């Protein structure tokens, strides 16, 4: 790592997928879902082993920035880039790259998400170092995750030829990005052996991703370039408001990566990665007892109960389960959720239902 | 019915089988489990259609009597017979019969339980009237319940020959009482067509049941006879304390009925009876929606959920279930219970576990 290497944490997510624990006012990344640290704090401390806090940037919305600065006080205030409104990951990447390029024309940046979990930090650092080496050779580097089951919840990356060069971890050219597949396709992709999940983590030179954005999304490029040139002046807010608000929301995958050239992938296995995007994926990264049960923030008394997650907010309450298998129980203040684990994706349907029926107080 | 017909409500039960809603401090019969009325109030109002309140007696413990008098103010104070300590249903029946015989030597009495549910009140009254007619002919009459499934939770009564006489409902001599059977036997008894569940409801002349008690449990007979003779004097408490406390606890079924002669049974079908002795039996008497779900005192939002009972104490809380079938969710203050319906008998194991592990605060 050098004085030109930076990390950018994308932290604007609303995250109602872990509802009813994550709420509008308390999004997922700001909660201590897996222990004492919040997911945001874990992300920061994972990165602080590689980057001094002055070279860690956070892109988020104003409401969340206040809490984040309390949770990670070492990151300087000027490293928080505030989105007036969410405009997708392409805009976030473009803004961070443009601001960084102004500060340091040789900047190389790792894009990280604030709300994912990574158990194996040593391997993570090893992979990030390798990714920076590849990025220095003018590649847009993606971190792929070796799939462990036929997930329909992630996009996939197909690898091609191994990349030339003496890297400490296998690196491949990317053949194709694939959107979230159906079940049958997901089975095929898992068995193919040459597909990784798209983790949303990237490493690239700021000038290189900006060149790609300029080519594929010129409107976005001109907006973020103008905002960046106003960044350290009195007209920043004005530029932000006039240019940002009018951007179309787009993801970096669909907007840029799918048609980019010189894209490489590091297919990471054993990272213990999870996007913690639903109760079942949170359950997977927790360590169960001999019956497969996990209890978080709660007193759980299980009878004939297996593979059941009991997640509480009040550990004075006694939660008794009898004859339950493969269930998630979330006891969260004004809402109680009891859900078959493999159906926990349907929490989003509940959230939609509540919106539609004017029960916003539960969101 | 005549001026000599009485009802005696046995109401001393502790009832931790509907834990965590029923607690030591709030036993089952004092709770509005099925609507606005408590089970005790329902029992009283069901009987008030047949008996004036002056001829309804309640046998209970001191702690419960206070609440009962608030819940059923029409029953005179002197009709509460207080047990200093529970000594089983044989002692309760003996005491009530002895006290009644002193007040009215021609007394005929219906023994009722405070914590059962009966949906069809018209049929109930019809059966009780018939039972009194049979009791006048010097029979000990039991109300049997025509079984609807092979229950292992109830005792059974086998009927013999039809009773001679012009009754408005079929009445049979009792051939045998049977203790709670195992599963295989319960199947046989259900199919036999001549077995009823033992409901614990009886009708008999006070002098006749006392004669039977004198024959089979002479010690109990002399105790309750002595207590009854002291009842309206200043020595009542003394007699109660000296004689009652030393009684052995025994049920009327085992202590008297199994060996009694001249026992008759009315096998009642369609009464909508339940002893509400466990969550699954409570569930059975509630009226479900099209998916088989029932919600009591709670806001329930079911997704892909069937045959599930959600029982709350706080109807402001939102309870979401996803992908659940045949489950009981009981959300009761400091305890949450999630239980497969057909395993709800195991609640008593939980209660035992809590006693053993010094968690009495949850009982």
Image (cartoon, coloured by chain):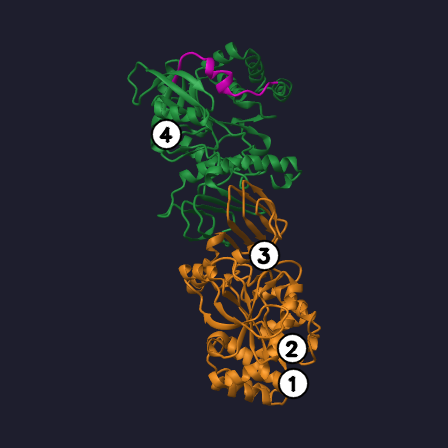
Chain colours: A orange, B green
State the extent of the magenta-drawn residues as a range. B247-264
Check disc 4 and report the residue beneath it. Answer: B124
Counting residues from the start of the chain, the first of labels 1 and 3 encountered is 1
State yes or no: discs 1 and 2 in contact (Cβ < 8 Å): yes
| Location of residue B110 in the rendering, given as x and y in whole percent from the top left corner | 43, 23
Label of residue A285 in the image: 3
Check disc 2 and report the residue beneath it. Answer: A6
Q: Residues within 10 Å of mark 4 (few under 14, many from 20)?
A: many
What is the spatial separation of the Cα atoms under label 2 and label 3, in whole angstroms?
28 Å
Q: Residues within 10 Å of mark 3 (few under 14, many from 20)?
A: some
Tell me the residue at 63%/35% (across/down).
Answer: B355
Judge whether residue B1 can be spotted in this image: no
User: Callout 1: residue from which chain?
Assistant: A
What is the spatial separation of the Cα atoms under label 1 and label 3, in whole angstroms?
37 Å
Check disc 1 and report the residue beneath it. Answer: A104
What is the spatial separation of the Cα atoms under label 3 and label 4, in whole angstroms?
58 Å
């Amino acid at each position: 790592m050098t004085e030109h290497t930076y990390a950018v944490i994308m932290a604007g997510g609303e995250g109602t997928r872990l509802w009813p624990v994550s709420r509008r006012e308390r999004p997922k990344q700001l909660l201590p879902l897996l222990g004492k640290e919040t997911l945001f704090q874990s992300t920061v401390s994972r990165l602080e082993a590689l980057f001094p806090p002055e070279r860690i940037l956070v892109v988020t919305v104003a409401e969340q920035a206040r809490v984040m600065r309390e949770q990670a006080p070492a990151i300087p205030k000027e490293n928080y880039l505030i989105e007036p409104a969410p405009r997708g990951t392409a805009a976030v990447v473009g803004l961070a790259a443009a601001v960084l390029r102004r500060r340091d024309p040789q900047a190389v940046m790792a894009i990280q998400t604030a709300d994912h979990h990574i158990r194996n930090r040593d391997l993570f650092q090893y992979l990030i170092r390798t990714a920076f080496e590849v990025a220095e050779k003018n590649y847009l580097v993606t971190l792929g995750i070796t799939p462990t089951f036929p997930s329909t919840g992630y996009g996939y990356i197909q690898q091609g030829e191994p990349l030339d060069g003496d890297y400490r971890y296998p690196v491949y050219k990317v053949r194709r990005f694939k959107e979230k597949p159906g079940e049958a396709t997901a089975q095929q992709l898992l068995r193919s052996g040459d597909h990784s999940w798209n983790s949303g983590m990237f490493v690239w030179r700021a000038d290189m991703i900006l060149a790609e954005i300029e080519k594929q999304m010129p409107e976005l490029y001109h907006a973020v370039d103008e905002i960046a040139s106003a960044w350290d002046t009195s007209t920043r807010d004005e530029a932000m408001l006039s240019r940002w608000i009018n951007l179309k929301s787009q993801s970096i995958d669909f907007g840029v990566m799918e048609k980019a050239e010189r894209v490489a992938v590091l297919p990471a296995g054993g990272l213990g990665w999870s996007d913690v995007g639903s109760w079942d994926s949170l359950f997977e990264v927790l360590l169960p007892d001999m019956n497969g049960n996990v209890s978080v923030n709660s007193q759980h008394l299980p009878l004939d109960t297996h593979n059941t997650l009991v997640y509480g907010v009040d550990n004075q309450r006694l939660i008794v389960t009898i004859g339950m298998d493969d269930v998630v129980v979330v006891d969260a203040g004004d809402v109680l959720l009891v859900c078959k684990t493999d159906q926990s994706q349907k929490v989003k349907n509940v959230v939609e239902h509540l919106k539609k029926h004017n029960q916003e107080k539960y969101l």
